Amino acid sequence: MSWFVRKEKGINTPTEMKREVPDGLWYKCPECKKVTPAREHKLNAYTCPYCNYHDKIGSEIYFEILFDEGEFKELNPDMRSADPLGFVDTKAYPDRINATIQKTGLKDAVRTATGKVNGREMVIACMDFGFIGGSMGSVVGEKIARAIDHSIKKKLPFLMISRSGGARMMEAGLSLMQMAKTSAKLALLSEAGVPYISLLTDPTTGGVTASYAMLGDFNISEPGALIGFAGPRVIRETIGKDLPKGFQKAEFVLEHGFLDFIVDRKELKSKITSLLDMIQ
């Protein structure tokens, strides 16, 4: 017989005595479903300590991770998209832009900045998927082009962190023109002998993959990132065949020669500076 017998059933704690667990104290990995204290998750560079799943992050956190003491100077911070085509889908394009700005606090899908990384001055451009799927419009192309110009002028290494669904349909051909513009600027960067490192994160697709994301002197990626032009579903339906296991994942892309190496986010800062030390 058990030494403890509950005499009354149910929980009788008064409502005013109940305590709610504050939001944001815990992180549940979407891959392995294990729970980690949010503070530990942050200290682990927003990766899962159990399965090493790399959580999706944006420019604010990448800048915090990479720039020394989190200090940097943002370049062209106030540029915003216009509406040259008068585009309307479920809502007018300017209304969608304004709503996204209010929701995210961002002006567009890329931020560019300059600062020190392990004591070395460099320029970083980082895309934010939360801004209309990280889509590449005229502002994205122009901010990247100006960041490259700054790299050339100051002879500073350039790091591009891509995370995008591709070109922005609301700007049609104008967004596709950014592929040519950024590629031409990168050619000038190469002629100037300034290193360009391209980091592909999950996902990097469409016109971004077909332009600046794959034009680095070194093309690197985070583990498990989806990298491709068209999505797996579109390819499967087009060719009418099942795709290989892990198709378009970073590991598959590396195996087939389209990446130089895969880097864990926790080692990203040291890997980048080590790489630059070897070539400069």
Image (tube, rainbow, N blue to C red):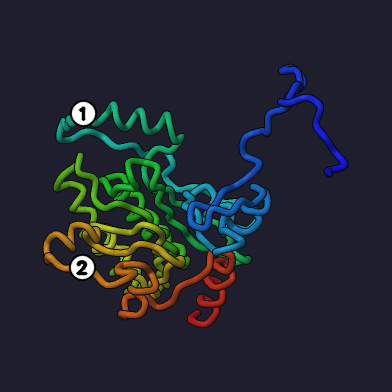
Q: Specify the amino acid type for callout 1.
A: Thr
- Looking at the image, residue 20 sits to the left or right of residue 177; the answer is right
Percent coordinates x, y for residue 37 in the rendering: 67, 49
| Residue appearing at x 42%, y 68% in the figure | 221
- Looking at the image, residue 108 sits to the left or right of residue 268; the answer is left
Percent coordinates x, y for residue 48 in the rendering: 57, 58
View extreme (front): residue: 1
View extreme (bottom): residue: 278
Percent coordinates x, y for residue 126 in the rendering: 43, 54
Percent coordinates x, y for residue 10 in the rendering: 71, 25
| Residue appearing at x 52%, y 58% in the figure | 32
Q: Residues within 10 Å of mark 2 (few under 14, many from 20)?
A: few
| Residue appearing at x 40%, y 51% in the figure | 127
The secondary structure type at the circle numbered 1 is loop
Q: Which is nearer the N-term, disc 1 or disc 2? A: 1
How far is mark 1 from mark 2, CA to CA? 34 Å
Check the image and report above or below for 102 versus 146: above
Which one is in front, 277 or 65? 65
Instruction: Check residue 29 in the rendering and tell me which mark sits there, or answer none.
Output: none
| Residue appearing at x 29%, y 30% in the figure | 96
Q: Residues within 10 Å of mark 1 (few under 14, many from 20)?
A: few
Which residue in the structure is indicated by mark 1? Answer: 90
Q: Quadrant of residue 258?
A: bottom left
Which residue in the structure is indicated by mark 2? Answer: 242
Which one is in front, 147 or 216? 216
Check the image and report above or below for 8 versus 48: above
